[in-house]
Amino acid sequence: MLPTLFITYRQVPGLSPGLNRVVDKRVVVYCAGLTDETKEEDVPGAVLGIRKAITTELHLPAFPRAVVYLGKKGGEDMKSMVRELLPREGTRILACVCGFQEKQVFAMGYGFQITPCECDGGGPTMARLINEAVTQFRT
Ligand SMILES: [Zn+2]
């Protein structure tokens, strides 16, 4: 398995907001920590935080795979971040079912893979994929 960067503007169960080096240089998770209560206008700031962290604290080319949560509040800021910074071939978008078709058009247009997940942050799916990646690198 290739080193994977997981990104969400929401929370991931068991992780703290910010950059989590779950397996150093192999499985890195950035969660901005937004919650259900967060307003849509708080998302751009969170996305800026993501951009800053992954471009200054990580060497992005070292992560050929990425998994990104794109929820209802994701919007254009998340999409441009994904488009500009993440690898075309190795990126999987976890999209909640709200406006799924439109997200699918976006993903397919740029060659990203897309997988449906739960609303409200896709926490369970995110946590499961992170655990799978960790298991691969620890065995
Ligand atoms: Zn949703």
Image (cartoon, grey):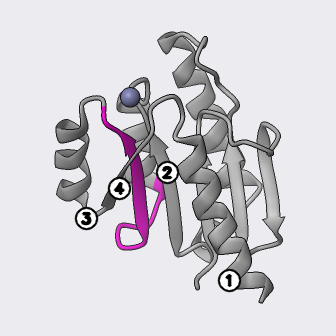
| Foreground of the two, 13 or 94 | 13
Q: Residue at x 71, y 68 (%)?
A: 27
Q: Residue at x 61, y 70 (%)?
A: 4
In this view, the mark in front (1 or 3): 1
Secondary structure under the numbered disc 3 in the rendered image = loop
Dot 2, crowdedness within 10 Å: few (<14), some or many (≥20)? many
Q: CA distance from mark 2 to mark 1?
A: 19 Å
Q: CA distance from mark 4 to mark 2?
A: 10 Å
For badge 4, the amino acid type reads: Thr
For badge 1, the amino acid type reads: Gln
Residue tagged by mark 2? 68
Query: Is residue 104 positioned above or below 60 on the image?
Result: above
Residue tagged by mark 3? 111
Mark 1 or mark 3: whose residue is earlier in sequence: 3
Q: Quadrant of residue 29?
A: bottom right
Mark 4 or mark 1: whose residue is earlier in sequence: 4
Which stretch is magenta? 85-97
Residue tagged by mark 4? 115
Q: CA distance from mark 4 to mark 3?
A: 13 Å
Secondary structure under the numbered disc 1 in the rendered image = helix
